[in-house]
Image (spheres, rainbow, N blue to C red):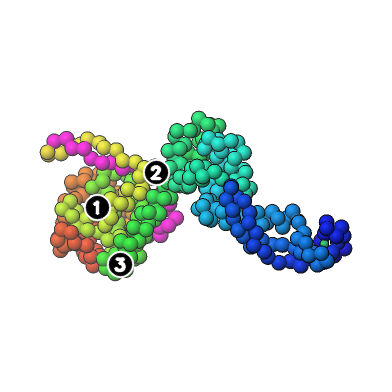
Amino acid sequence: MKGDFCPNCEEYTGVTLGVEKEVYNVRGEPIEIEAEVAICQKCGEKIFDEERDSRNLEKAYSLYREVRNLLSPDEIRTIREKYGLSQRALSRLLGLGEVTIHRYENGAIQDNVHNNFLRFIEDPQNMQKLFEANRNKLPSYTAARLKKRMANLLQEDKEQAFQVSFERLVSHQKVDLTSGFKEYDLEKLKNMILYLVKRLDGVLETKLNKLLWYCDSLNFKETSVSITGAQYIRLPYGPVPDNYERIIGIMQPELLDKNEIPFNTKEGIVLGKQFTALVEPDESIFSGKEIEVMNFIADTFRNDTSTSIMNKSHQETAYKKCEDGDIISYEYAKELSLSLNK
Ligand SMILES: [Zn+2]
């Protein structure tokens, strides 16, 4: 049997496929589309076909969504899956009927208010607000899983935002003596911080900055390249990695913990910021030599206070040859007071 069944001719006939402008009524609004049609070659009537009609309706719906700036079913699914929620769980969280999201993902046109709601929760920060207000609507294990997922998403957003602004900042950074002939490697810098903090079981902020500089400088002295590619700035309290605050900023609170602890100085009791590592450093990204350098620096200064390590760094040629605010060139590393195997 060829062709389609024509109810008019009451037999299977040849059909001509084509397109025709048709107006569909979507939510009370006339939507005109180029509809697929099949014409009976015998009587010239249009032949109805359920599949074809549903494709046409789909087309009208998607045009309506476009005109009304509504999310597509795929976009709704993407938002839901971003949070790892079932259709039912998302419906509940949004305070909608149990099957509402299921219907939307299957092509039903969403209510405007629901659409705005879904757009709102695309941003994990907004999702978090919604979640905090409605967490009792979810089973506890679903709530716990969602909470963890949001924390990851927020961290990713933060790192991404940081990465963008960071790349802008370092894009002009050269692979030369200011960076120790090494491309800037944020992962290594983060892990070097974790490594030192962990090996010393907590490090005060001022001391940490000096340790980082000593590690990169000593590695340069030994191998002619730095470990992290970081540039260090000469500040009155000693060398500090450029963008230091931002780096610490993205490591908190998930990777690094900061506590204020009181300690005695000549000026009386001062509060120092002490870092502790909350995760294990990834040692696999370092060479054996780099690990050796970091161990040596950590152990050499193990018992130094922030003040004594600062005073030692002030005695280094690299520090003496620069002015406050200068980038400290790695060329002075060859005159560093420390060497491996000595
Ligand atoms: Zn016919």
Q: Position of residue 241 (x, y in %)?
A: 27, 56
- Above or below residue 155? Residue 182 is below
Residue 224, can we see it? Answer: no
Please tell me whether mark 3 or mark 2 is closer to you in this view. Answer: 3
Residues at circles 3 and 2 in contact by the CB criterion of under 8 Å: no
Magenta range is 268-292
In the picture of the structure, the residue carrying the numbered disc 2 is 254
Residue found at the far left of this picture: 267
The label on residue 210 is 1
Please tell me which of labels 3 and 2 falls first in the chain. Answer: 3
At a point 15% along the width and 63% down the height, the residue shown is: 321
Q: How much space separates mark 1 and mark 2, taking CA atoms? A: 23 Å
Name the residue: 62% across, 39% down: 99
Task: Report the amino acid beneath label 2.
Answer: Glu
Three-letter residue code for mark 1: Lys
Question: Which image quarter: residue 278?
Answer: top left
Helix or strand or loop: what does disc 2 sit on?
loop
User: Label 2 neighbourhood size at 10 Å, few (<14), some (14-19), many (20+)?
Assistant: few
Distance of mark 3 from mark 2, alpha carbons?
30 Å
